[in-house]
Image (cartoon, rainbow, N blue to C red):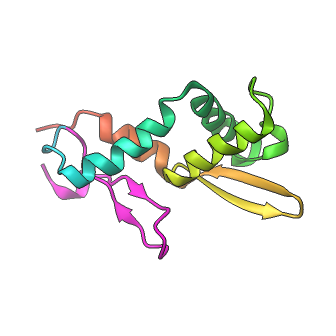
Amino acid sequence: MSNSSVVELPVLNQPDGAVVPCCPPLTERPLSAGEAERTAKMFKALGDPVRLRLFSLVASHEGGEACVCDISDVGVSQPTVSHHLKKLKEAGLLASERRGTWVYYRVEPGVLAAMGQLLTAGTR
């Protein structure tokens, strides 16, 4: 398989701001221990129904970003929403920006496509 068809899944929340690629599609080669750990962190964050719902609300929100004030009605308290959003951000799935008293969240660029590519069977 040509490396030009490989889409790497980035983990974008490194302390120094560096982008660390995750891994190639699962059908290309077995994941290394490090790749599996980084990828599992993202999928684990989405394994919680509230987090998956919050991620979906942010991803589908008009304009591609959502104020925390717009996504708090998911059946849990506001502190719990904040906790789950923090976990999604730590996993590299969401980015946030404070504007005045509100925090706005958006899906990290390329995350959805890269996660999909990871699970898509490539041609051999």
Determine the image quadrant of residue 20.
bottom left
Residue 28, image x and y in percent? 15, 44
In the image, residue 67 sits, relative to residue 55, either above or below, namely below
Quadrant of the rendering where the C terminus is positioned: top left
- Horizontal side of 119 relative to 18 (left or right) equals left
- Horizontal side of 32 relative to 16 (left or right) equals left
- Horizontal side of 123 relative to 79 (left or right) equals left
Q: Residue furthest bottom?
A: 16
- Horizontal side of 48 relative to 104 (left or right) equals left
Start and end of the magenta stretch? 1-26
Between 75 and 112, the residue placed more toward the observer is 75
Residue 116, image x and y in percent? 39, 38
Q: Is residue 5 magenta?
A: yes
Residue 83, image x and y in percent? 66, 44
Q: Residue at x 77, y 37 (%)?
A: 71
Q: Residue at x 13, y 45 (%)?
A: 29
- Is most of the magenta stretch helix, strand or loop? loop
Q: How many marks?
A: 0
Q: Residue at x 62, y 49 (%)?
A: 86
In the image, residue 14 sits, relative to residue 43, either above or below, namely below
Residue 95, image x and y in percent? 62, 56
Q: Residue furthest right?
A: 101
Determine the image quadrant of residue 108.
bottom right
Q: Residue at x 30, y 34 (%)?
A: 120
